Image (spheres, helix red, strand yellow):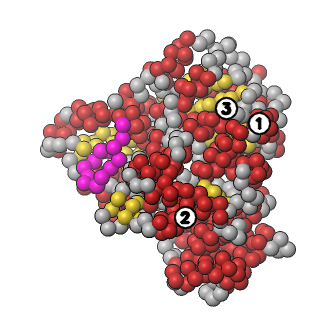
């Protein structure tokens, strides 16, 4: 980052700003830094944006300015890290510019690759009709391959998951190898442009795992499947080997903006170099780089500036989210470089509460008591968040139990799954099974949700399906079979077929569990409604990423319990951050910079009030008398 700061200091000052009344509508209200981004014509532009500094607004204004200058929407791509962020960007752009923005591509690198697969499957080296696996599908496929090689394996329970596990494959004495670690290591290798088979063999010290990876590739080809990480690899490979395809893509997307660039991996930086030849803009906050375990490459920003030595660097430092007390605390504790320290735009007063906690129970009691007082003072439940490093910490369950006893409703996101994401993935399996007749993974997931279906019945149905197709699905699978037939049959109205699938899905899921049923179904209902409204077809739905895990779906009046990674991109009025509390549960060992960045992300989610709980020793009086010193000592490892 130091090299970037040097470049910032050496660049010329920005030109004089035009009067507000003379600006076009889409530039009114931008601060001077945001305006600089929107108006810049530099071929390569790097924007270093602190938390809450309005980078999304600046990105949308940049796209609007390109459209205003006559660039066709079909020549513009806005790429970001999550589907939720992409949807927000697209909604803002269309609300400001209307139909003219319809041609602009807004999505993730993965959705860009999926779209290219629909349009140019043969160019990517994939057969037509290939469907995309989500993470649950991948784990199931790897399990099938493990069974073939006699490799014992097990899945982690939801609360056993640790964000950041990608460089170890745990071996349980009796259960075998951890399937989730195998999947994570494979994803990390692909993102880092390493051979996955060799990487797995190195981690496990077993030749079998190189063969396992080869078998997984065969399984994908045989069943017409591909996961998102391999899809990116196919796109990258096609761009490297096929000059005509490379020229076509370069001509189609002349102006490209990449948001959250600190989360990009090596593959994504390589793909970026093949598009946006008229203007490339990358926006990010290096202090929010927390996805190293997935192969994210924060040094990629430095590499970008070296590849484009004439690039312009702009900083966004005016924080519109948090009160001055929070901004000042974050600046003094977590931001190392003066050039990117934030300046508070808000004038209201807020609070930062630092607690040195002797045990987890004390932290839980303080937190729940504070939440109850805040809600009594009129703060809505969904404006309060409790943020953890991982869902493995005992404090998570203790908080849940204490909230339940207090009558405070809550939702939980993060860890292995989010409840709403589970439902979306399960419904999507029905659509994918209808789209790809060879997709036995999605078919099995769909069959498993049928009430009263035994594992033996599901297995037999899948085996018979391979021989006779859908006619093999007899009782208790007949209703599901009819829905799959309707979705596949073009003689039926697709909208009515999709709604029929939704009705059956809701029936099945309600029979299995009616707990928080409508809250669980809300994202599924909303997605189906959006698909129907937008006229999406079976191909589009089956081969598009879903807003599942990091969608930020909020349940009204429910306090949010979340991991740091799932909190990224979100904000709350009040935040309680649990950090470094005592625990006997193994936690991921983070580097000093990763620890600092994790703390930065968590603390910058708060708008008005921030509570930090960290381990501390001594009596309450001793801890209270020298609280700041105690907290500073605990936070010092961030450096």
Q: Residue at x 75, y 72 (%)?
A: 487
Judged left or right of residue 280, residue 263 is left
Judged left or right of residue 599, residue 357 is left
Task: State the CA–CA distance, disc 1 to disc 3.
Answer: 14 Å
Label 1 Cα crowd, 10 Å radius (few <14 / some 14-19 / many 20+): few
On the question of residue 576 being in view, the answer is no
In the figure, residue 27 lies in which quadrant? Answer: top right
Residue closest to the eye, 417 or 205: 205
- The quadrant of the picture occupied by the C terminus is top left
Sequence-wise, the earlier of marks 1 and 3 is 1
Label 2 Cα crowd, 10 Å radius (few <14 / some 14-19 / many 20+): some
The residue pinned by badge 2 equals: 141
Task: State the CA–CA distance, disc 2 to disc 1.
Answer: 34 Å
The residue pinned by badge 1 equals: 243
Residue 626, placed above or below residue 498: above
Residue 191, placed above or below residue 361: above
Residue 384, placed above or below residue 477: above
Q: Residue at x 27, y 37 (%)?
A: 634
Circle 3 sits in a helix, a strand or a loop, which is it?
Answer: loop
> Which stretch appears magenta?
579-591
Circle 1 sits in a helix, a strand or a loop, which is it?
Answer: helix
The residue pinned by badge 3 equals: 273
């Amino acid at each position: 980052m130091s090299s970037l700061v040097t470049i910032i200091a050496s660049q010329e000052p920005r030109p004089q700003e035009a009067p507000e009344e003379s600006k076009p509508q889409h530039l009114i209200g931008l601060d001077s830094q945001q305006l600089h981004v929107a108006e810049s014509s530099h071929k390569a532009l790097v924007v270093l944006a602190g938390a809450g500094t309005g980078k999304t607004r600046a990105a949308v204004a940049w796209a609007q300015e390109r459209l205003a200058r006559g660039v066709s929407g079909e020549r513009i791509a806005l790429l970001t890290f999550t589907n939720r962020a992409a949807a927000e960007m697209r909604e803002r752009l269309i609300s400001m510019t209307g139909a003219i923005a319809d041609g602009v591509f807004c999505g993730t690198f993965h959705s860009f690759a999926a779209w290219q697969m629909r349009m140019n499957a043969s160019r990517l080296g994939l057969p037509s009709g290939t469907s995309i696996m989500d993470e649950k599908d991948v784990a199931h496929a790897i399990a099938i391959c493990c069974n073939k090689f006699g490799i014992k394996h097990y899945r982690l329970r939801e609360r056993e998951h640790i964000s950041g596990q990608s460089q170890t494959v745990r071996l349980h004495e009796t259960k075998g190898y951890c399937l989730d670690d195998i999947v994570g290591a494979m994803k990390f290798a692909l993102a880092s442009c390493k051979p996955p088979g060799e990487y797995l063999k190195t981690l496990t010290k077993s030749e079998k795992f190189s063969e396992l990876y080869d078998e997984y590739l065969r399984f994908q080809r045989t069943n017409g499947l591909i996961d998102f990480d391999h899809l990116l690899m196919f796109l990258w490979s096609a761009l490297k080997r096929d000059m005509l395809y490379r020229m076509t893509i370069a001509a189609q997307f002349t102006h490209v903006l990449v948001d959250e660039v600190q989360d990009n991996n090596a593959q994504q930086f390589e793909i970026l170099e093949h598009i946006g030849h008229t203007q490339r803009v990358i926006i990010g906050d290096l202090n929010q780089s927390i996805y190293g375990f997935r192969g994210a490459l924060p040094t990629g920003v430095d590499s970008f500036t070296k590849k484009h030595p004439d690039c312009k660097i702009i900083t966004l430092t005016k924080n519109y989210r948090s009160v001055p007390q929070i901004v000042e605390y974050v600046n003094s504790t977590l931001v190392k470089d003066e050039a990117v320290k934030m300046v508070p735009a808000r004038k209201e007063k807020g609070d930062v509460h630092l607690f040195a906690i002797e045990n987890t129970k004390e932290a839980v009691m303080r937190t729940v008591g504070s939440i109850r007082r805040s809600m009594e003072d009129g703060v809505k439940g969904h404006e309060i968040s409790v943020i953890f490093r991982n869902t493995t910490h005992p404090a998570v369950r203790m908080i849940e139990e204490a909230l339940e006893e207090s009558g405070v409703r809550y939702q939980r996101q993060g860890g292995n799954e989010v409840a709403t994401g589970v439902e979306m993935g399960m419904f999507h399996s029905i659509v994918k099974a209808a789209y790809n007749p060879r997709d036995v993974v999605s078919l099995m997931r769909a069959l498993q949700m049928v009430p009263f279906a035994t594992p033996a019945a599901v297995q037999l149905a899948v085996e018979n399906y391979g021989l006779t197709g859908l006619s093999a699905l007899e009782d208790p699978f007949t209703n599901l079979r009819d829905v799959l037939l309707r979705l596949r049959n073009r003689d039926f109205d697709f909208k009515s077929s999709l709604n029929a699938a939704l009705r059956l899905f809701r029936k099945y899921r309600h029979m299995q569990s009616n707990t928080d049923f409508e809250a669980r179904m809300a994202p599924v209902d909303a997605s189906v409604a959006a698909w129907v409204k937008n006229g999406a077809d079976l191909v589009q739905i089956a081969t598009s990423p879903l807003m599942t895990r990091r969608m930020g779906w909020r349940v009204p009046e429910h306090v949010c319990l979340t991991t740091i990674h799932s909190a990224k991109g979100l904000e709350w009025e009040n935040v309680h951050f649990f950090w470094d509390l005592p625990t006997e549960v193994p936690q991921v060992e983070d580097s000093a910079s990763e620890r600092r960045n994790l703390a930065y992300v968590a603390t910058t989610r708060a708008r008005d009030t921030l509570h930090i709980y960290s381990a501390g020793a001594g009596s309450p009086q001793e801890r209270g008398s020298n609280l700041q010193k105690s907290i500073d000592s605990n936070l010092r490892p961030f450096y």
